[in-house]
Image: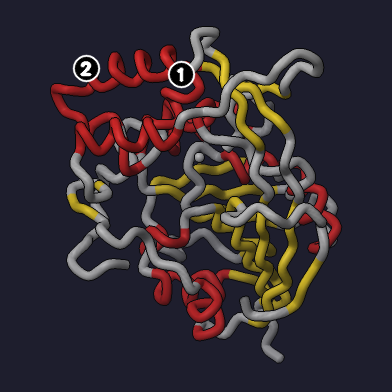
Amino acid sequence: MDTGWEWDDSLFEGTARYYRRGRLPYAPGLAGTLAEVLKLDGRGRLLDVGCGPGVIALSLAQLFSEMVGVDPDRGMVAEAAREAADQGVAGKARWVRARAEDLPAGLGTFDVVTFAQSFHWMDRDLVAVTVKDMLKTGGALVHISDLKKDTEVEAETETGTGVGVGAGTEALIVGGPPPPAAPWPAVDELVKEYLGPVRRAGRGVLPHGTPGGEAAVFTRAGFVGPQRHVVPGGQPLERTVDDLVAGVFSMSFSAPHLFGARRDAFETDLRRLLRDASPSGRFSERQPSTEIFIWRNDPR
């Protein structure tokens, strides 16, 4: 992480209620791909680190007998518990409010550990070594993210080193002109007008963004791999003004609390911008593909 930035518990404060509606979904077929590659059959234990409102863990619920989600944000853990109850899987789900750095926290051993767009917020070397000790021999660490350069649509496997489901997101109706694209560049400029040009992150700033280079971290920790899989997206999605507003407030760099007393003014300006861009209040976006890197806890 950038020098001078320290994690604090306001990083995602107030974002949990917006997360499921605002974030674009992971690509269809993610659960099926993991089931096939990892030979998951409804048994075993899953640990989802930085679980947020439980998007990944709950999408994989049918593949495990027990799931444990860990997240430091109180709102995220509460949302995950509510969603698990709504989906009828509360009996095999446990949600723990803790930082990844607090692991193992007496949680036991696991067959699979997932990090879905969360690993970059952690003390990565410490967490990688810790979760390796929590994995059974031959167990898998799965790093999941949106494919940043979404030019690959094939679901193929390679060996090398290498914004959760929105409740308001629907497939576009076939026929007729599509709605306009979501005006994200203009939205980004509006956020900067209110919060300044440097990316906010909790009580601090991240002028250079979050770190990459996960492969080096996992290799140093002793993992073997990775196997790379791309689950294709590309599906056209229809989004509403409310969906896009939720998307903005679901992000750490535009979390509701960062606007302080100007929060309502910002939302008014945001909704005006979106209505000007699409008087119908409808927008089109494409679902991103999902990139998966699988690392093994293999003593060989």
Q: Is residue 198 left or right of residue 271?
A: left
Q: Amino acid at mark 1?
A: Ala
* SS assignment at label 2: helix
Q: Quadrant of the C terminus?
A: bottom right
Among all residues in the image, which is located at the extreme top?
A: 280
Q: Residue at x 29, y 31 (%)?
A: 190
Around disc 1, counting alpha carbons within 10 Å, would you say few (fewer than 14), some (14 to 19), or many (20 or more)? Answer: some
Chain-order first, disc 1 or disc 2: 2
Q: Is residue 10 left or right of residue 294?
A: left
Q: Is residue 225 left or right of residue 105?
A: right
Q: Which mark is residue 277?
A: 1
Number of residue marks: 2
Residue 217, position as x, y percentages in the image: 48, 78
Q: Is residue 4 visible?
A: yes
Q: Amino acid at mark 2?
A: Ala
Q: Is residue 219 above or below residue 190?
A: below
Q: Residue at x 23, y 31 (%)?
A: 257
Among all residues in the image, which is located at the extreme front?
A: 177
Q: Quadrant of residue 292 in the image?
A: bottom right
The colour style of the image is secondary structure
Among all residues in the image, which is located at the extreme left?
A: 261
Q: Is residue 147 above or below residue 271?
A: below
Q: Which mark is residue 17?
A: none
Q: CA distance from mark 1 to mark 2?
A: 19 Å
* SS assignment at label 1: helix
Q: Is residue 91 visible?
A: no
Q: Which mark is residue 265?
A: 2
Q: Nearer the viewer, residue 109 or 188?
A: 188
Residue 235, position as x, y percentages in the image: 74, 35
